[in-house]
Image (cartoon, rainbow, N blue to C red):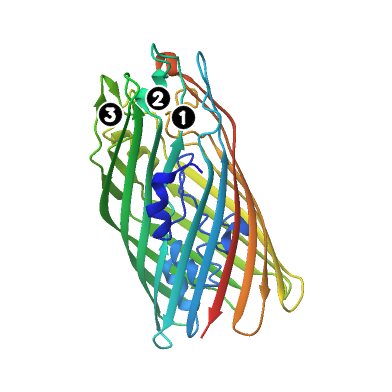
Amino acid sequence: MKFKSMLLITALCSAPSWAGGLYLYEVGTEDVGLAGAGMAARAQDPSVMVANPAGLAMMKGDQLTLGAQALYGDVPYTVNNGNNADNVIGWFPGMSAFYSHAVNDQVTVGLGVYGNYGLALDFGGWGIAGPKGNYVGSAAIKNGATMAVTIQPSMAYRINDEWSVGGSIGINYGYASLTRDTLFGSEEKTSSDDWALNAKLGVLYQLDESTRFGLAYTSATQYNFDLNPTVLGQQALVAQEVNAPQQIMLSAFHQLTPRWAVMGNLGWQDWSAYNHNKNNGNEASQQFKDTWHTALGVQYQYSEKLRLNTGIAYDSSFYKDSQNASLTLPSGEAWRFGIGAQYQLDKKNSLGIAFEYMDIGAASVNHLGPLSGQYNDSKMYFLTANFSTQF
């Protein structure tokens, strides 16, 4: 299995995430079946704190949601001249956990553990063959990763029947690794970690029993990694200063009938912050721009116990020019298509499954000389299961 160096993060219950200038919204919850639509306003379980901590005001008593996720990335890199990197992603598991406790009618507290930022790539032997049977590309990067897990204490306060506010602190652990082949045939591995803080602030407005709106702001997170910059003149292609950018998410949820509900998102992410990263590689400079997000989802209450979900989402590319992309951020614009179901086992327990297909488009890497190439027709697949209980 690829990403062996990421097992530490798995043990900390993070879901892997990277791609296309996006936070991955997928953390093993019901949102996956909706392609994330309505995530800051739906507020049907404690995982709402990922998008909007104010949504915890909708939680009653004590609730727990657990998520499990299997991700498969089909992301081949074709080198213009030389040996291709067949699939730089492959399989990776993830987990998440969210708990909420209603202190009284006005105050609800919660805690989440999840991962929704990073990248992990495994190129293997690629590029032009060297004099000792190795590959020049592998001397720059054989596999590398930047991953993060968040521990998020949260609190929501219900001002009145219409308005609720919330906030949370993200205690973020970041881990970066890089493996390269030396020109003499040996392998060098290096890794680094860092802790960083960020914050979320949110508001939830309930127009009536059927309609609510959520607005949330997430501040930027900066990690500083200490990775060896060069190996025999070959520079690393993994950033040492990594910014998980600030973002704003606006969501709406409306219960049309007792059976049908619709929901949607509008979002913005400040990915132009990546232009200031301390990147040791021969990456194109100043190539990033902010991204915009939109999503639409539908829920159908098939029976008293079974709820069906589906959704579609779009995120614009964070590249100013998709022909001048970064080797370690292989994506153009992204489309998500989700489907899922939630089954109420009894009054307190429910079980859900979801599947999502994500098309992350194509991008060309044209600034690495003989290592230049293309990411064509890149895709990711998510299969998730979740369990929620009240006690």
Q: Determine the CA span between mark 1 and mark 3.
A: 20 Å
Residue 68 picture quarter: bottom right
Residue linked to disc 1: 124
Query: Relative to residue 328, is residue 93 depicted above or below?
Result: below
Q: Based on the displayed image, in which of its 4 quarters is residue 241 positioned?
A: top left
| Mark seen at residue 280 | 3
The type of residue carrying mark 1 is Gly
| Disc 1 crowd, CA 10 A, few/some/many (<14, 14-19, 20+) | many
Q: Nearer the viewer, mark 2 or mark 3?
A: 2
Residue occupying the far right of the picture: 303
Pinpoint residue 7: horizontal percent, then vertical percent. Answer: 41, 51
Cβ–Cβ below 8 Å for labels 2 and 1? Answer: yes
Gap between marks 2 and 1 measured at Cα: 7 Å
* Label annotation for residue 11: none
Q: Distance from label 2 to label 3 (Cα)?
A: 16 Å
Which mark is first along the chain, 3 or 1?
Answer: 1
Q: Which residue is mark 2?
A: 138
Please state the horizontal and vertical placement of residue 20, each as a whole percent of the image.
Answer: 48, 39
Q: Callout 2, which amino acid?
A: Ser
Which numbered disc flags the more N-terminal residue, 2 or 1? 1
Give how far across and how far down residue 284 sits, in percent: 37, 24
Give 6 or 51, whichever is nearer the viewer.
Answer: 6
The answer to which of marks 2 and 3 sits earlier in the sequence is 2
Q: Residue furthest top?
A: 131
User: With 139 as the anchor, is 52 left or right in this view?
Assistant: right
Counting every numbered tag in the picture gives 3
